[in-house]
């Protein structure tokens, strides 16, 4: 009878060990599947962000092209001489050069220029940031 009890105890221990191994395998498989799903989601988010970045750059280039075209139109439709001619030429020059800059550099170029400007002038940048924050706070608090 003692041997039978010992055998039952051993069998029960083996069953518990087998169940623990199966649970461990299931947990490992679930972890791998979760990791694969997370990796897929991260990849899709990265692809979407890349797509949106490309679309933003394309839109910026299109805006630059439109600005250049508008500058040409203003130049063509303003007089060559006098106050209106001088003002129209200056506006056309500004639009054309700004449009060219947007086409050549895009949003990345604007970001780099802004970063460099802030690095060269940190105190005025901070003061401008505080001023803009104050104005935004005032505008949003008035309901």
Image: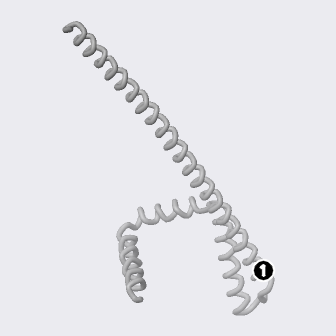
**132 above or below 14?**
below
Quarter of the figure with the C terminus: bottom left
Measured from the top left, where is residue 126 in percent x and y? 36, 71
Percent position of residue 21, x then y:
37, 23
Image-quadrant location for residue 136: bottom left
Write the residue at 67% across / 81% down: 90
Q: Name the residue under label 1.
A: 73
Residue 41: horizontal and vertical position, in percent? Answer: 53, 47
In the figure, residue 53 lies in which quadrant?
Answer: bottom right
Give the number of callouts.
1
Q: Residue furthest right?
A: 76
Which residue is more in the foreground, 15 or 36?
15
Outermost residue toward the left in this view:
2
Mark 1 secondary-structure assignment: helix
The residue that appears at 40% across and 75% down in the rendered structure is 128
* Nearer to the camera, 101 or 84: 101
Q: Is residue 134 above or below residue 10?
A: below
Q: Badge 1: few (under 14), some or many (20 or more) residues near its Cα, within 10 Å?
A: few
Q: As drawn, is 32 to the left or to the right of 110?
A: left
| 64 sits to left or right of 9 | right
x, y (%) of residue 99?
67, 70
């Amino acid at each position: 009878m003692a041997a039978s009890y010992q055998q039952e105890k051993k069998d029960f221990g083996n069953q518990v060990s087998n169940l623990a191994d199966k649970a461990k395998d299931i947990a490992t498989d679930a972890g791998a599947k979760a990791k694969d799903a997370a990796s897929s989601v991260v990849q899709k988010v990265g692809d979407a962000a890349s797509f949106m970045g490309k679309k933003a750059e394309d839109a910026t280039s299109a805006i630059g092209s439109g600005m250049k075209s508008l500058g040409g139109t203003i130049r063509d439709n303003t007089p060559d001489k006098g106050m209106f001619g001088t003002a129209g030429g200056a506006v056309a020059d500004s639009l054309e050069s700004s449009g060219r800059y947007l086409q050549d550099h895009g949003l990345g170029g604007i970001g780099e220029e802004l970063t460099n400007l802030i690095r060269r002038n940190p105190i005025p940048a901070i003061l401008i940031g505080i001023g803009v924050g104050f104005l935004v706070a005032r505008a949003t608090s008035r309901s």
